[in-house]
Amino acid sequence: MKRRQFLAISAIAPFAGVTLVQAADQVEYTREAYEQALASGEPFMLDFSASW
């Protein structure tokens, strides 16, 4: 791999994860939805933030 290609990929890589996360289905959190996702055995992600 050439140096220029390596640098270009390195510069773009951090944004690739953001794009994938934004493309995922977003569902409002409920305890029932969490339990259902957990029981399905499929991978899932909880994303949250606090304003304080």
Image (cartoon, rainbow, N blue to C red):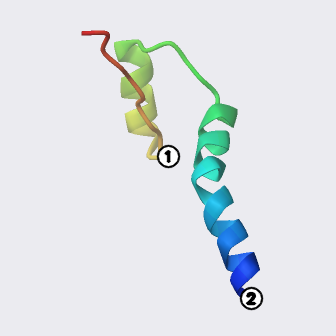
Numbered badge on residue 25: none
Residue 44 drawn at (x, y percent): 47, 40
Mark 1 → mark 2, Cα distance in angstroms: 38 Å
Q: Residue reaching furthest bottom?
A: 1
Residue 13 drawn at (x, y percent): 62, 59
Towards the viewer: 49 or 6: 6
Neighbours of disc 2 within 10 Å: few (<14), some (14-19), many (20+): few
Q: Total of numbered circles in the picture?
A: 2
Q: Which residue is mark 2?
A: 2
Query: Would you place residue 29 above or below residue 35 in this image?
Result: above
Foreground mark, 1 or 2, reads: 2
Residue appearing at x 24%, y 9% in the figure: 52
Towards the viewer: 29 or 17: 17
Quarter holding residue 19:
top right
Query: Would you place residue 52 above or below residue 44 in this image?
Result: above
Residue 47 drawn at (x, y percent): 42, 28
Residue appearing at x 59%, y 23% in the figure: 26
Tell me the quadrant of the picture where the N terminus can be found. bottom right
Q: Residue reaching furthest front?
A: 4
Q: Amino acid at mark 2?
A: Lys
Q: Quick one: SS at disc 2?
A: loop
Q: Which residue is mark 1?
A: 42
Report whether 25 appears left or right of 50. Answer: right
Q: Quick one: SS at disc 1?
A: loop
